[in-house]
Amino acid sequence: MEFMDTSNRMDIIHSTSNIFYTRVSQSHFTSLEEVIARLTLRHEVESLVLLGSGAEGILHPASDYDIMLVLAGMTVPISLVLTTIAQRLAEVVFFSAETLERWLTTEAGDTAKNAAPMLRRLQKARVVFDRTGRTTRLHEKALGHAWQDEHTQREVWEAWFFCNYDLQHTRRLLASSDHVYLLAVDLRLLSGISEAWKAYFLVRRVPWQGEKEALRYLADHDPDYRLLLQRCLAEAKREHKMQLYEELVKLALAPLGSLWSYDATAIELYTEGDIQPEALQTAFAWWEAALSS
């Protein structure tokens, strides 16, 4: 099949300091098999992997194509291509052979920050082309471990801090009769609910593998929390939605303790790395001393 010329379809958006660029790709009119065949003819393409439902050959109307493309040399600075293949949404993630080589020497306990999620995805992947065998070896390595995310103490602390922080401010806004304030509550609830259920997984050190897998996990391990999430999302009355949201946050952070009380004082530190108790104690002591001056 010959690629169709779509060069006449091009969208470029200029702003003061940026250029945003999209176009219709030839892949829109081309089968997945043909796209794979064309890509593997490129000398810089070392391997190509199908991820997700496409790897299993089980595609639903809402399914997309997920592809991992490994380049022997990154001749162009591409990280991700969001496109269409055969008129189906497709996401192509790019990695260098050098990155895969690092992952091959990585042990399960000291996985690089972005390696664990990708190695978990490789467990359900299908290698369709591998010029050197490197990706096949990595696929075999991926199958041999659970590849848990190594969340830092700071990441857990930030989830605890900002879920409580958002809850406090949303409560404050809800006490107003000003329609602007109440509309702000509706907007904050959209993001707050999302952050709360993501915090549920982070706090419990459960790997995050996207919304669909997270919902399946809850169905198997905590159906009550999933039901609460569904009720919160579907609730139309603002006050009731707020109550359900607060319960979502409370349960998400339950392993860390109770929610902040209304009169609580919390301090965020301007520092990198893990939060040290001594640093927090010093900050609280400074604040109280400053008020006593």
Image: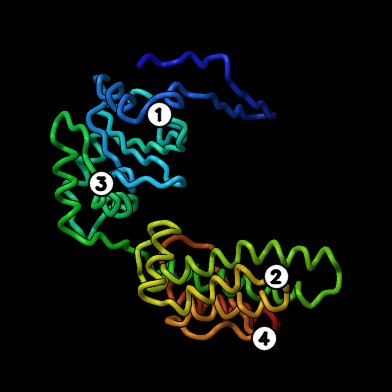
- Tell me what residue is drawn at x 28 percent, y 29 percent: 71
Residue at mark 3: 125
Compared to residue 114, the image places residue 266 above or below, namely below
* Left or right: 15 in relation to 23: right
Distance of label 3 from label 1 (alpha carbons): 24 Å
**Residue 134: % across, % down:** 16, 37
Residue 116: give x, y in percent of width and height: 29, 54
Report the Cα–Cα distance between label 1 and label 4.
50 Å
| Mark 2 vs 1, N-terminal side | 1
3D distance between C-alphas at marks 2 and 4: 29 Å
State which tag comes first along the sequence, 3 or 1: 1
Mark 4 belongs to which amino acid? Asp
Callout 4: SS: loop
Per the model, the C-alpha gap separating discs 4 and 3 is 50 Å
Q: What element carries label 1?
A: loop
Q: Which mark is residue 236?
A: 2
To which residue does mark 1 refer?
Answer: 77
Q: Nearer the viewer, mark 4 or mark 3?
A: 3
Looking at the image, do the residues carrying marks 1 and 4 touch, with CB atoms under 8 Å apart? no
**Could you tell me how far apart the alpha carbons at marks 2 and 3 are, in whole angstroms?**
40 Å
State which tag comes first along the sequence, 4 or 3: 3
| Residue on which the image places disc 4 | 263
Q: Quadrant of residue 245?
A: bottom right
Q: Split into 4 quadrants, where in the image is the C terminus?
A: bottom right
Q: What residue is drawn where x is 40% and y is 35%?
A: 79
**SS at circle 3:** loop
Q: Which of marks 2 and 3 is nearer the N terminus?
A: 3
The spot of residue 209 in percent (x, y) is 38, 57
Of 258 and 184, nearer the camera is 184
For the residue carrying disc 3, how many other residues have a C-alpha within 10 Å: few (<14), some (14-19), or many (20+)?
Answer: many
Q: What residue type is labelled 1?
A: Pro
Q: Residues within 10 Å of mark 4 (few under 14, many from 20)?
A: few
